[in-house]
Image (cartoon, rainbow, N blue to C red):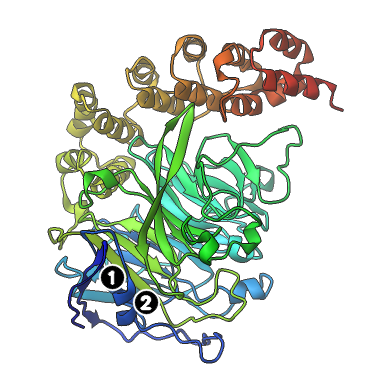
Amino acid sequence: MQFRSVARGVRSFCLLPFTFCLVASAQLPPGVTDSQKAGDVPTPAAESLKKITLPPGFRAQLFAAEPQVMQPIAMEFDDRGRLWVAECFSYPTLKKNNGVSNPAPDRIVIFTDRDGTGRNVERKAFLESGRNVTSVLPGFGGVWVLSLPDLLFYPDANGDDVPDGPPVVHLTGWNIQAGHNFVNGLAWGPDGWLWGRHGITQKSTVGRPGSPTNEWVTLDCSIWRYHPVTKEFEVVCRGTTNPWGLDWDENGQAFFSNNVIGHYWHVIPGGFYKRMFGTHENPHLYELMESCSDHLHWAGAKWSEARGGPAHDALGGGHSHCGLMIYQGDNFPPEWRGRAFIGNIHGNRVLYDVPSRNGSGYTAKHGGDFLMANDPWFRSTVQITGPDGGVFIADWNDLGECHDSDGSMRSSGRIYKVAHGTPKPVANLNLAKLGDAELIKLLGHPNEWYRRHAQRLLQERATAGKLDRGTMASLPKLHAAEKDVSRQLRLLWALHVTAGTDEPFLTTQLAHTSEHARWWAIRLLTEDKKVSPAVLAKFVTMAREDKSAFVRLGLSSALQRLPVNDRWELATALLAHAEDAADKDLPLLTWYGIESAVAADPTKAALLLAKCQQPQVRTFITRRLTAK
């Protein structure tokens, strides 16, 4: 297909050609049919592309479209720069059948950009008969797949895109009755864990097959993580409605997008957030944390009435959001770096917020619209950065919203690529073939895509005992010599995932000039929930003396990772800061950390009450002491 460039007013877009080299014919899986109302037909892909508008200098390209891709619910790149896409045909039938599994198979397909231009794309299938697939993520010699009710790992050690055998069930218990709030969103975190999201409508009780069920974890709306090596599973924070986007900023802080009750949330480990409905299991939380955005994407009123239209258009389009990408690539102009991109379902667009530090945490200001589809069929589910710094945007492509009351167009789907100017083509990548030194060098690459893949490959080699001793010895030296905090953090994470950090080293980082380095030192020192008396004493001193409210937030978060009897002195130091009384998050997070201690030891709680300089927490302590 050939298109010519078009410009409209102050917004512009460029339309680029694409060609598919099909390995096998692409069509709907057996038993899957469209249920969209008669007469409702998607805008042809070429026409949809013409409708897109972007800020000046940006251009849109159709990377894939039906029948080569349909129902793209999730996508991620592998180390070769290939795009893996999960096609979910089991939704919405799964939802409508009240959790009865749909026999129609889901697919995982791989797209290879053969020359790096997006105009010569090859498609192949990795999995043709998936079950309730909501996410796909390559790594550790295979592919991780959320396939309700399981977290599966398909081994593919030789990388030939053919599973070496049946999938390994790492976790099970994900609820298939959760409608459109089911578990989703696999992603590799800077801590070396596999992260994911879960919605509010149904609880899941999750654990490793064969492990004692009393060790399993019950969760609903939350952010969780699973370690691919130690097999540990835990909830990071709880609350909101239906998280459907997750990313990390330059400093390794996680954020997620959500629907209905606020669209942008800072992942504070141990946090309990406001919920759309229902209550958290602990009745003594008393108050819950709010979103860190300072605005809504609709014009107030009832969220249920905020489903697009003129009243909401200027503010973002409506209450439903899908996907989150904090741009850290090297293609967009510098002013776009660090902005948070979110798909707005009702607004048929991708918009952006501008995050910044505020108090102990963050706030997000409304930025504006980035991609306007100008097409009621556009439903962006994912936004991710590619190896050339361009952004790939998945479009579920359905006329109805997530509740799908008008039927479902199962045979459509698009993936767009958006770039500023003409990025240098990147083709024939294979980071796994690089040496250790080359991977370490990539930790400082201006495109976060390289940094994340390089770190995970180093982690894989260390886990397999294949990381050269010289490499392991060089990382601490490089970390010590590095002056740029961002690059130093990446070296710190690389040291952590390769078992290169220990208590003495991390303790030195508690005195780092950067509040972000100090926050990460606190986090990593409490990773295994075993804190020595010496480290605990350091924490108490920091709680008293550190000038950064952000560091105190990290210390408050650490409370929940300490034995209950070891929390008193640290909590007393934190609650002595009267200046934190009006902070949005600090008093609440500290309370969550001491609630169980207050209940267990009323005498010590009374002593803490007398010293507490934060009225909100004093009220909570009193209330807890008088509770039955």
Which residue is depicted at the point 55% across and 60% down?
Answer: 150
Task: Estimate the spatial distance between the alpha carbons at disc 1 and disc 2, rounded to whole Å.
Answer: 10 Å
Give the labeled residue for mark 2. 69
Earlier along the polypeptide chain: callout 1 or callout 2? 2
Q: Secondary structure at mark 1?
A: strand
From the viewer's perspective, tell me whether residue 154 is left or right of residue 16. Answer: right
Residue type pointed to by label 1: Phe
Measured as percent of width and height from the top left, residue 302 is found at 66, 57
- 352 vs 442, nearest the viewer: 352
Q: In which quadrant is the C terminus drawn?
A: top right
Q: Is residue 457 visible?
A: no
Mark 2 neighbour class, 10 Å CA radius: few under 14, some 14 to 19, many 20 or more? many
Mark identifier at residue 111: 1
Q: Are marks 1 and 2 in contact (CB under 8 Å)?
A: yes
Measured as percent of width and height from the top left, residue 324 is found at 42, 53
Of badges 1 and 2, the one in the foreground is 2
Compared to residue 175, the image places residue 540 above or below, namely: above
Mark 1 neighbour class, 10 Å CA radius: few under 14, some 14 to 19, many 20 or more? many
Measured as percent of width and height from the top left, residue 12 is found at 25, 65
From the viewer's perspective, tell me whether residue 373 is left or right of residue 586. Answer: left
